[in-house]
Image: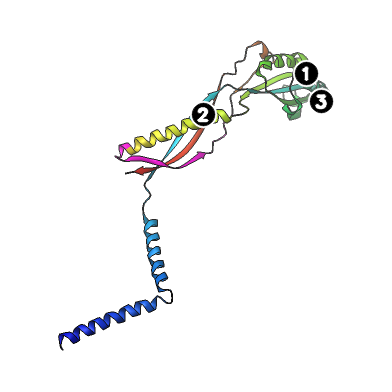
């Protein structure tokens, strides 16, 4: 076959192939082609590996407590439950009156328990009477009045009073938690820099920061006897801890 005829058939075949591809694209063939290209690009981006390092930082800050919670118990006994309860009611009412006179607000006074139970002889066989315990929690926002409040409560109820716990706390932790959070983020960054440095990489920008929910920890508690007002009580300081999780990009 002559060379010119062969060339003509090749050109015609190529034209037919182009026409077929154009026809498959439909009326919006250009849009279909663009869509295939965008899909391919998105798949490529999704499959790429994120280069980042994540660290956990823990920060701690201290502050002096400004609130104290006193746990009082009024305990009475008598031959019958009714008499024991009557005696307890009188002592508890006197205690509440005294606490209010010391400046404790009604909202800061709470009855936390009331128990009535029999008492037995040494052989635990015969009931000898009944005991009643009324537990009252008082919250003081002026620590300077703590000693005088305990002393007044003791003198009011006499031998019936028990001081079970002294619990210090910080009423508003916003400022101290902010200082602890700054320390936590600084620790997280220092750890990340150490890690990437050891790996021969460079630390990039912050990708994300998240607070780690803290596990509630009870504040310091101190057992005390009824005459503890004669012993100076030092509130000291309380530590507030904040944990953060920080993710950094790897640069370079």
N-terminal of the pair, mark 1 or mark 2, is 1
Front residue (pair 147, 248): 248
Q: Specify the quadrant of the image occupied by residue 142.
A: top right
Q: Quadrant of the N terminus?
A: bottom left
Distance CA(mark 1)–CA(mark 3): 24 Å
Which residue is denoted by mark 3 in the rendering? 85
Q: Specify the quadrant of the image occupied by residue 4.
A: bottom left
Q: Position of residue 158 (x, y in %)?
A: 76, 14
Q: Residues within 10 Å of mark 3 (few under 14, many from 20)?
A: many
Front residue (pair 75, 130): 75
Where disc 1 sits, the SS reads helix
Residue 8 as seen in the image, left or right of residue 137: left
Residue 41 as seen in the image, left or right of residue 8: right
Where disc 3 sits, the SS reads helix
Which residue is denoted by mark 1 in the rendering? 101
Report if residue 155 lies within the magenta region: no
Q: Nearer the viewer, mark 3 or mark 2?
A: 2
Q: Pick out the residue farthest to the top.
A: 230
Q: Nearer the viewer, mark 1 or mark 2?
A: 2
Q: Position of residue 38 (x, y in %)?
A: 40, 63
Q: Specify the quadrant of the image occupied by residue 121.
A: top right
Read off the magenta span.
Answer: 197-219
**CB under 8 Å between callouts 1 and 3?**
no
Q: Is residue 126 above or below residue 247?
A: above
């Amino acid at each position: 076959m002559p060379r010119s005829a062969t060339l003509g058939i090749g050109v015609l075949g190529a034209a037919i192939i182009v026409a077929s591809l154009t026809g498959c694209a439909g009326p919006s063939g250009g849009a279909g082609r663009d869509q295939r290209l965008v899909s391919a690009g998105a798949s490529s981006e999704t499959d790429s590996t994120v280069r980042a390092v994540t660290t956990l930082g823990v920060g701690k800050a201290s502050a002096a407590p400004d609130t104290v919670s006193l746990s009082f118990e009024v305990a009475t006994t008598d031959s019958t439950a009714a008499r024991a309860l009557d005696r307890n009611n009188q002592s508890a009412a006197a205690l509440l009156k005294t606490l209010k006179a010391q400046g404790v607000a009604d909202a800061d006074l709470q009855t936390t328990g009331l128990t009535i139970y029999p008492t037995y002889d040494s052989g635990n066989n015969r009931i000898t009477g009944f005991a009643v315990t009324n537990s009252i929690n008082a919250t003081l926002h002026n620590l300077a009045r703590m000693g005088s409040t305990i002393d007044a409560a003791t003198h009011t109820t006499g031998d019936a009073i028990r001081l079970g716990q002294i619990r210090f706390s910080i009423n508003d932790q916003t400022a101290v938690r902010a200082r602890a959070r700054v320390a936590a983020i600084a620790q997280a960054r220092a750890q990340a820099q150490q890690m990437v440095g050891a790996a021969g990489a460079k630390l990039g920008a912050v990708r994300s920061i998240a607070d780690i929910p803290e596990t509630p920890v009870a504040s310091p508690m101190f057992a005390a006897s009824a005459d503890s007002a004669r012993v100076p009580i030092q509130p000291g300081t309380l530590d507030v801890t904040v944990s953060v999780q920080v993710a950094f990009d790897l640069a370079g």
